[in-house]
Amino acid sequence: MAEEEKTHAAIDVQVPLEQHDTEIADMEPLIVKDLLTAVGWLWKNCHAFRGFVEEPWYLKLNQEDQEKALQFNQAEINDDQQLAKEPFMFCFQFKEDMDVFLCECLDKRHLRINSMFMEF
C-alpha cells in the first residue's frame, strides 16, 4: 500500500489521560493502571494503525459499574473468564494492528491487557 493511501486508526477516545486524577490512579488496581498506560501509548501512536481501534468499555462505565467489573475480574471464575475480560478489552479492526499493539504493550512493557480483533 502506498504511503499516501494509508489511513490512520480511528480511536474511540473518552477523556484525555492528563485529566485523570493521579492520586486516584495510584490507588487503582494493576489492571486499570496497565489499561491507562496502554491507552496512553495507543493515543501517542495512533498513526501506526490502519484500522479502527476501540478502547476498553471499562473507561466508559460509571464508578459503581467499574467496581463491579473489577470485582468480577478479580474473582477469575473459570467458566466466565472471557466475560470478566470484556470490559478491559481493546478491539482492533485488523490483526496486524493488534500485533503491533501487543508487541509494544504486552511483550515490551509487560502490561496486563486484553485484546481481540474483529473486522468491522
Image (spheres, helix red, strand yellow):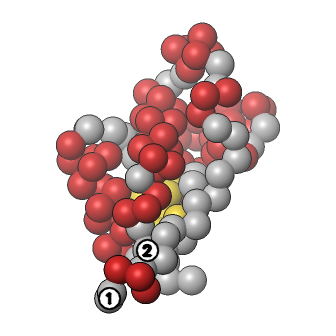
Q: Tell me the tag on residue 50.
A: 2
The answer to whether one can see residue 18 in this image is yes
Identify the residue under disc 1: 1
Q: Contact, CB < 8 Å: mark 2 with mark 1?
A: yes
Query: What amino acid is at disc 2?
Result: Arg
Name the image quarter holding residue 24: top right
Query: What amino acid is at disc 1?
Result: Met
Instruction: Give me the C-alpha separation between circle 2 and circle 1.
Output: 11 Å
Towards the viewer: 107 or 81: 107
Label 1: how many Cα within 10 Å (few below 14, some 14–19, many 20+): few
- Up/down of 52 relative to 39, above or below: below
Q: In the image, what residue occupies the spot 48% across and 77% down?
A: 7
Q: Reading the chain from its start, which is encountered first: label 2 or label 1?
A: 1
Name the image quarter holding residue 4: bottom left
**How far across and how far down the image is residue 112, in percent?**
36, 40
Closer to viewer: mark 2 or mark 1: 1
Label 2: how many Cα within 10 Å (few below 14, some 14–19, many 20+): some
Secondary structure beneath label 1: loop
